[in-house]
Amino acid sequence: MTRDYRKGMQFLADARERLDMVAKKLKLDSGLVDKLKFPKRALIVSVPVKMDNGRLKVFTGYRVQHNLDRGPGKGGIRYHPEVTLEEVTTLAMLMTWKCAVVNIPFGGAKGGIYCNPREMSLKELEGLTRRFTYEIMMMIGPEKDIPAPDVYTNPQTMSWMMDTYSMHQGFSVPGVVTGKPVDLGGSKGRLDATGRGVMFATREGLKHLGLSLKGATVAIQGFGNVGSASARLLREAGAKIIAVSDISGGLFDPEGIDIPSLIAYIKKSKDKLLKGFKGPKFVSNPKRANEKLFSLKVDVLIPAALENQITSENAHRIRARMITEAANGPITPRADKILAKKKVFVIPDILANAGGVVVSYFEWVQDTQALFWKEKEVNTKLEEIMTEAFYDVLRTSKKHRVDMRMAAYMLAVSRVAEATRLRGIYP
Ligand code: NAD
């Protein structure tokens, strides 16, 4: 595997450029801006794993805490062949803004391991996870930094992390990670939480545009945890999902894809991919499938795969009325400018996909209190927070005559800056 470091570096440069723009609007002190541009701390670890063939393989892992002024660090762990320190650092920064925009008492963190999980057995993944947890143990803990799942990690990964951490403490510490299975102190509603938040944000966005979810046409890039839950919940709310894609290609049906059957098909299939699903037209070349999906005339386009998907090269082909950023950083700053000219209403990632971290917060609260809530309670509280955050951002956007992304950043950065100001600089 050879890593392309430029992508992560560009991602970080873009995030810092965005912060500069926001800081200018907020007239923030340049020293404070520097503090916000760089992570509080970053750890690089070597993770030796005994592979199934008996050989030792060493992976590189990262945990980055961007800012902890508003509370413990919070952010997912990503297993992916494109993970770099720069990518993880950027995602940690996005987590700081995300927690602040929905006003939950967490700072931003992120972790990742440079690996290809699709080529690893369950036993190898368990070894990787447990050793990685041990290596970052000095940084994590319920009061310090609480990891969660991200790309190619899941409730099983979180179970191994929780167990490894607990074995070292000598007692069970469920609050060290979120996104656990319900049987191990996870929260009801967590699996769907990001998708549910995407649905709430999309619903309010359409309302703002004078449209309704009922009958709205939607295209979704990425059909993993977030993409599939968003598709299912949007469909349940009356929307028509006319295109979805993943790494195997894309499915297209102007009459609407049967999402429950597709999800059932993927669950049963060996490789968990869209390919082979009967009915809708299938475009097997993933690049072409994405091109087609991005250029569809739909009410809502939802990138729910990875960062840097909508760029200056393809943004001018977009014909969607609105984009809900379910993935982190799917639109580059240059593409943003093109979309603004085309008057596409963009609900930014730090707001649109915050449902996951909100329910992670609920999970942490429940673990800390050892008192668990019904799913209805979780979903109702999530809806309240997401709706309130959406209108906080919309009001800021109207007041300062800026787009939703700038408004979300202004709100988030000002909240973090205020926490820093109140705490002061130690010593
Ligand atoms: P996942 O691994 O479950 O799913 C990713 C999906 O994207 C898969 O279907 C994969 O095939 C697809 N994909 C990858 N590259 C693609 C490409 N080039 N074209 C089309 N499809 C592609 O991951 P996830 O948890 O659903 O996360 C997706 C995004 O949402 C990430 O950016 C993640 O950081 C973000 N996010 C996730 C959560 C969460 O709770 N899981 C919360 C907030 C944000």
Image (tube, rainbow, N blue to C red):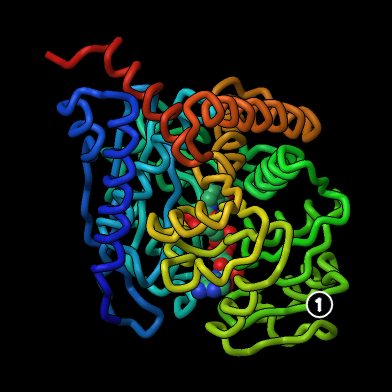
Residue 102 in the image: state x and y as whole percent.
54, 29
Which residue is depicted at the point 52% across and 45% down? 348
The amino acid sitting under disc 1 is Asp
The reply, left or right, for residue 68 in relation to residue 404 is left
How many residues crowd around disc 1 within 10 Å: few (fewer than 14), some, or many (20 or more)?
Answer: some
Residue 131 drawn above or below residue 297: above
Disc 1 C-beta below 8 A from ligand 1: no
Q: Quadrant of residue 285?
A: bottom right
Outermost residue on the left side: it is 427
Given the current orientation, which residue lies at the most extreme top position? Answer: 422
Residue 317 placement: quadrant: bottom right
Q: Along the line of sight, which residue is nearer the eye, 57 or 148?
A: 148
Q: Nearer the viewer, residue 63 or 94?
A: 94
Q: Please give left or right for residue 190 compared with residue 151 in the image.
A: right
> Where's the N terminus, which quadrant?
bottom left
Residue drawn 42% across the image and 35% down it? 409
- Quarter of the figure with the C terminus: top left
Query: In the rendering, at what x and y percent does residue 11 appear?
Result: 32, 57
Residue holding disc 1: 253
Question: Hey, which residue is sitting farthest front in the picture?
Answer: 341
- Picture coordinates of residue 66, whole percent (x, y): 29, 38
In the image, 84 versus 334, the foreground residue is 334
Residue 202 percent coordinates (x, y): 70, 46
Helix, strand or loop at label 1? It is loop
Could you tell me which residue is drawn at 40 percent across and 80 percent down? 52
Image region (quadrant) for ligand 1: bottom right
